[in-house]
Amino acid sequence: MGNPSVAIVLRKIRSLSDYHGLFEAAFNKPLNMETLGMAFASYQRSLNSANSPFDQWHFGHNNTAVNASVKRGFQLFKGKANCIACHNINKNSELFTDHKLHTTEHGYQISMHQRLKKQKILVAPGQYIEIDSNLFDSVSEKKPNDVGLYEITENPKDRWKYKTPILRNIALTAPYMHDGAFKTLEEVIDFYNQGGVRNTDLDPLIKPLGLTAHEKTDLLAFLNSLTCSNVDGLISDAFAAPVGDTK
């Protein structure tokens, strides 16, 4: 997140001597877009975290693990908000993703420079200020076009397509969207409540939701209930892992 392109990521990794030979040793192939994705997938598979309040309630049948707002939010997630269309669930486990790519047209909006007049800037943990977007542009590098999967396939049908992320521990992973454009979950909910960005390539699953303020609060409560109790341990393990360890 925050890197302009896959090519720049590859260039950065190739410049780090710690990584020399590690991709070949792990995957029998040199560093490229494919093996970079394989490395990310290997790491992500190690992040086993499924003891959130939601899990304790939904799978553990502990009715006191979450409050009424969370329960209402889950019904919205499955029903009116239709988040479940992409963030899939089943009766045995819930990764909250269909592992597919969709077009919300957020990438299109950024590429076409269709944005708000003001944007939020992080100045301290949890603290943001709003500044004029033109002022921000005057002291920042111009971003390259954000074209999604097209950057890899060069298939015009893949423009602005991005993979559905999982939602576990989502309250801890700000900023949101593939480019970190939204600083809070409230902004994400508002984006989908308005139906994404209207364009001819918009995924038909994404439509205006008509959520009320109370419903958005309940949906947020549900998303917050997906935070697991072992997050600190996962973070410690990640920092303790030797560079190149694929086990």
Image (tube, rainbow, N blue to C red):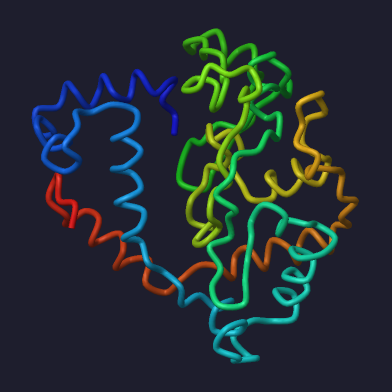
Q: Is residue 17 above or below residue 113?
A: below
On screen, 192 above or below 181? below
Between 131 and 227, the residue placed more toward the observer is 227
Count of number-bearing discs: 0
Percent x, y of residue 55: 55, 78
* Relative image position of residue 221 (x, y in whole percent): 67, 67
Q: Determine whether 61 is above or below 96 in the image.
A: below
Give me the residue at 55% from left, 41% from top: 163
Residue at 69 percent across and 50 percent down: it is 186
As drawn, which residue projects farthest toward the front? 28
**Measured along the vertical axis of the image, is residue 200 above or below residue 49?**
above
Residue 120 pos. (x, y %): 61, 32
Image point (73%, 18%), residue name: 114
In-image side of 203 versus 20 (left or right): right
Between 144 and 98, the one lying in front of the other is 98
Compare residues 140 and 110 and report the one nearer the observer. Answer: 110
The image quadrant that residue 247 belongs to is bottom left
Question: Which residue is located at x 67 percent, y 52 percent?
Answer: 86
Q: Position of residue 193 (x, y in %)?
A: 81, 46
Q: Quadrant of the N terminus?
A: top left
Q: Is residue 195 left or right of residue 176?
A: right
Report the front residue among 100 and 123. Answer: 100
Res 72 → quadrant: bottom right
